[in-house]
Amino acid sequence: MQLHQLPKINKSKKSRVGRGISAGQGKTAGRGTKGQKSRSGYNIPRRFEGGQTPLIARLAKAKGFTSRTTKPAILNIAKIEKHFNDGDEVSFKTLKEKGLISNTSNGVKILGPGKLTKNLKFRDVKLTKKLLSDLKNIKSKPALKVEKPIRSSAKKKTAVKKSTK
């Protein structure tokens, strides 16, 4: 293909608005007269309904609150006292075998109220502070190995130190 055979390219210039009345789009530059739409920086969100109460505010709201944090299965110490013998090991596995907890991957937390009279060993379970102090009073040897459940949605927070100069 030679130079004189190249197709012609339309080089029409973009119209410049607001450059005087004789330029075609002068004075208001095609924006009409006054109002929000004629001003510079104009941007009305698509959800805006002209001052009317927006649809999102008119719709009914769902009652209640659903927490995003995963919580461990809660178990009372009285149930453990009832189902375990002296010297037994209380762990996630043994609690599941005895049918005291269902299949949860968030761990188990043992709460009061109730007194622990048996000498039990606790493994892979969370205990309340009061229950821990009761265990020390009984002179039980709690083999505590508390493992935190792995959460995929957990966000790591980094502490930022501010320097003062």
Image (cartoon, helix red, strand yellow):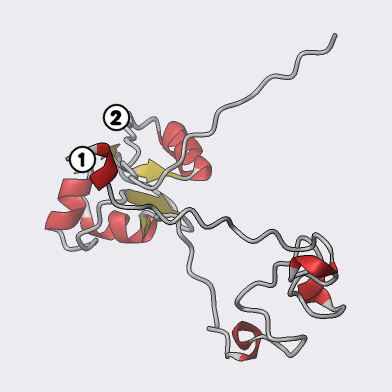
Which of the two residues, 164 or 41, is positioned nearer the viewer here?
A: 41
Q: Is residue 130 above or below residue 137?
A: below
Q: Position of residue 41 (x, y in %)?
A: 76, 60
Residue 53: x and y in percent read 72, 88
The image quadrant of residue 78 is: bottom left
Pick the residue in front: 155 or 112.
155
Q: Residue at x 48, y 58 (%)?
A: 113
Q: CA distance from mark 1 to mark 2?
A: 9 Å
| Along the viewing direction, whichever of 140 and 100 lies nearer the viewer | 100
| Residue 50 spot, x, y in % from top left | 74, 86
Number of the label disc, if any, that sits on residue 143:
2
The quadrant the C terminus occupies is: top right
Q: Amino acid at mark 2?
A: Ala
Q: Which residue shows up at 65% across the image and 23% down it?
A: 160
Q: Residue furthest top?
A: 165
Label 2 element class: loop
Query: Which residue in the structure is indicated by mark 1?
Result: 89
What residue appears at the point 35 percent right and 38 percent down from the top-left corner? Answer: 148
- Regarding mark 1 in the picture, which secondary structure is present there? strand
In this view, 40 is above or below 63:
above
Splitting the image into 4 quarters, where does residue 19 fall? bottom right
**Which disc is residue 141 wearing?**
none
Frontmost residue, 12 versus 68: 12
Amino acid type, residue under disc 1 in the picture: Glu
Discs 1, 2 touching: Cβ within 8 Å? yes
- The quadrant in which residue 47 appears is bottom right
The crowding category of the residue bearing disc 2, from other C-alpha atoms within 10 Å (few below 14, some 14 to 19, many at least 20), is few
